[in-house]
């Protein structure tokens, strides 16, 4: 139960982070001739932090598998996969715009 609660909480936090990261891009007014603050934002620190978090989740999954808690390990791997998808989305958005 505790693992499910923490996994759900982490999923909610990650989803909220994606929404917050996307919100300024939607709400920012674009003035002709002015550089957009959103375009100048560098997400490399976020990507580094997210990769570190993904690696921690995968390490936790290995430890959980070793002690026999395969359901919790699956949940950790699922969250790591979500993080990787968010990382890929951020990288693609920076490459294309």
Image (tube, rainbow, N blue to C red):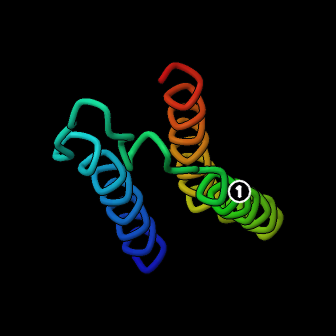
Please report the residue visible at 49 percent of the width from the left and 45 percent of the height from the top: 40
Residue 88 visible in image: yes
Q: Nearer the viewer, residue 46 or 30?
A: 30
In the rendered image, residue 43, in percent from the top left (x then y), is placed at 57, 50
Label 1 element class? helix
Q: Which of 94 and 53 is in front in this view?
A: 94
Point out the residue furthest to the bottom here.
2
Residue 70 visible in image: no
Please report the residue visible at 21 percent of the width from the left and 37 percent of the height from the top: 31
Within 10 Å of disc 1 (Cα), the crowding (few <14, some 14-19, many 20+) is: few
- Residue receiving disc 1: 48
In the rendered image, residue 78, in percent from the top left (x then y), is placed at 55, 46
Q: Which of 59 and 92 is in front in this view?
A: 92
Point out the residue furthest to the top here.
96
Please report the residue visible at 20 percent of the width from the left and 40 percent of the height from the top: 26
Does 66 sit left or right of 35 as displayed?
Answer: right
Dividing the picture into quadrants, the one containing residue 25 is top left
Does 53 sit left or right of 38 as displayed?
Answer: right
Q: Is residue 2 above or below residue 11?
A: below
Please report the residue visible at 57 percent of the width from the left and 62 percent of the height from the top: 72
Q: In this view, does 28 lie above or below 48?
A: above
**How many numbered circles are shown?**
1
Q: Nearer the viewer, residue 91 or 12?
A: 91
Does 39 sit left or right of 43 as displayed?
Answer: left
Q: In this view, does 47 lie above or below 67?
A: above
Point out the residue furthest to the front here.
33
* Image quarter hosting the N terminus: bottom left
In the rendered image, residue 45, in percent from the top left (x then y), is placed at 65, 59
Q: In this view, does 44 lie above or below 92?
A: below
């Amino acid at each position: 139960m505790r693992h499910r609660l923490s996994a759900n909480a982490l999923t909610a936090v990650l989803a909220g982070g994606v929404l917050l990261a996307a919100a300024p891009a939607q709400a920012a007014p674009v003035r002709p001739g002015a550089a957009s603050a959103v375009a100048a934002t560098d997400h490399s620190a976020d990507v580094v932090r997210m990769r570190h978090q993904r690696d921690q989740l995968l390490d936790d999954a290995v430890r959980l598998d070793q002690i026999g808690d395969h359901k919790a390990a699956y949940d950790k791997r699922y969250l790591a996969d979500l993080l990787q998808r968010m990382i890929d989305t951020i990288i693609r958005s920076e490459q294309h715009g």
